[in-house]
């Protein structure tokens, strides 16, 4: 097994080019922090001034594919094969990047392509704008081009929000409203999703009341759709406007579960769901795909999204507050009785 830093050095030093065909050996390789992963950028020295987009290879994902190599030579050969497939098959739209910095300063020119993308707690891009909402993190991104399920996006720099002449609150509200237009929400019964993955699974063994909320066009980061009340209301309608829990499956999908006798709005029920989320995140979800460790709750009558724990606490406080007048009445009644005696 090879170490991650050994594989990274193959790209940092350019040693991986020794395993590539001669027509690819002239490529320049640069290592960049892409926020939620380490990227390898391949630049053709002849074409690098054209302003065309450059494909970026996810080195973290590549390492997972080659880490079981017996030595660094085998890892180099396997890495080169991945690089070749990547460069031949990656979608690269015919657009000019040179005008992008100026374009990002004018909200009206890009408003129909701006959306919020959910990112993991490990996301680290100091230049990108970042919004934190109820323990989740969201980055505004610009959809540059799309072809079927292939797309190219760019995170919006912090400076662009100021350049647009908008406050952060104004910008966030506008982008939040447009997110569903870019991501195209899809609400599917979880049983249908699972049967597509495991066709032999018996439908009666599945919970027919759970839904998966994601993007029709398979855009990464689609869990940001939970910020749109119109989307959450569509889910509520399927539950006859009953309250429901939201399970953070990944940054690209959430799963909904109705409040009922099996999952009531109690501290015990929420603790059980939270434990399940923690276990799945720690054992089955990649670090850069984790949305949150919290369970969420949607109040269909109040149209309010909150952490389930906060909802439970606030509910108890409301009930205690409602009980106060009755307690006062009983106290006054007791005082009056004592006076009469």
Image (tube, helix red, strand yellow):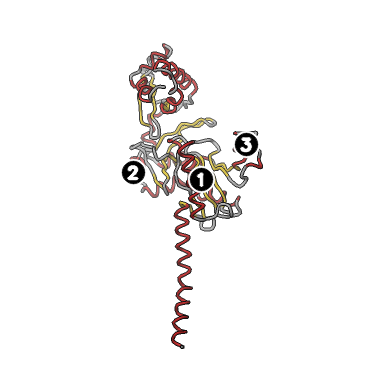
* 340, 112: nearer the viewer: 340
- Determine whether the residue tagged by mark 1 lies in a helix, strand or loop: strand
Query: Do tag 1 and tag 3 residues touch (Cβ < 8 Å)?
Result: no
Above or below for 19 versus 266:
above
Tag nearer the camera, 2 or 1? 1
Residue 132 point in image, percent of width and height: 39, 46
Residue 284 point in image, percent of width and height: 49, 36
- Determine whether the residue tagged by mark 3 lies in a helix, strand or loop: helix
Numbered badge on residue 195: 3
Q: Is residue 178 left or right of residue 242?
A: left
- Determine whether the residue tagged by mark 2 lies in a helix, strand or loop: helix
Q: Going 48% across and 69% down the picture, which residue do you hit?
A: 323
Residue 195 point in image, percent of width and height: 62, 36
Q: CA distance from mark 1 to mark 3?
A: 20 Å
Report crowding for label 2: few under 14, some 14 to 19, many 20 or more residues within 10 A (C-alpha).
few
Asked if one can make out residue 53 in the rendered structure from this viewpoint, the answer is no
Numbered badge on residue 162: 2
Q: Is residue 16 left or right of residue 198?
A: left
Q: Going 60% across and 43% down the picture, which residue do you hit?
A: 189
Q: CA distance from mark 2 to mark 1?
A: 34 Å
Which quadrant: the N terminus?
top left
Which circle's residue, 1 or 3, is located before the other in the chain?
3
Name the residue tied to disc 1: 247
């Amino acid at each position: 097994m090879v170490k991650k830093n050994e594989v990274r050095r193959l790209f940092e030093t350019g040693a991986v080019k020794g395993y590539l065909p001669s027509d690819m050996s002239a490529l320049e390789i640069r290592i960049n922090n892409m926020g939620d992963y380490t990227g390898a950028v391949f630049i053709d020295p002849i074409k690098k001034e054209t302003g065309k987009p450059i494909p970026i290879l996810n080195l973290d994902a590549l390492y997972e594919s080659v880490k079981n190599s017996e030595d660094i030579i085998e890892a180099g050969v396997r890495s080169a094969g991945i690089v070749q497939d990547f460069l031949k098959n990656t979608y690269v739209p015919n657009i000019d990047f040179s005008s992008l910095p100026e374009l990002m300063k004018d909200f009206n020119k890009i408003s129909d392509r701006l959306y919020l993308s959910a990112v993991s707690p490990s996301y680290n891009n100091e230049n990108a704008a970042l919004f934190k909402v109820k323990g989740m993190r969201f980055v505004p991104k610009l959809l540059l081009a799309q072809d079927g399920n292939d797309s190219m996006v760019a995170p919006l720099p912090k400076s662009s929000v100021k350049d647009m002449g908008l406050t952060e609150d104004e910008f966030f509200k506008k982008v939040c409203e447009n997110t569903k237009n870019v991501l195209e929400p899809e609400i599917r019964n979880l049983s249908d999703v699972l049967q597509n993955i495991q066709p032999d699974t018996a439908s009666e063994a599945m919970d027919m009341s759970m839904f998966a909320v994601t993007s029709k066009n398979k855009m990464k980061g689609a869990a940001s759709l939970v910020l749109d009340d119109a989307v959450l209301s569509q889910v509520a309608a399927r539950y006859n406007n009953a309250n429901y829990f939201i399970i953070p499956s990944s940054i690209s999908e959430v799963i909904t579960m109705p409040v009922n006798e099996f999952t009531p709005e109690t501290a015990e029920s929420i603790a059980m769901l939270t434990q399940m989320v923690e276990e799945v995140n720690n054992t089955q979800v990649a670090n850069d795909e984790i949305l949150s460790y919290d369970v969420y709750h949607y109040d269909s009558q109040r149209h309010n999204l909150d952490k389930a724990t906060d909802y439970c606490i606030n509910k108890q406080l409301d009930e205690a507050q409602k009980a106060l007048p009755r307690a006062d009445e009983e106290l006054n009644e007791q005082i009056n009785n004592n006076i009469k005696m």
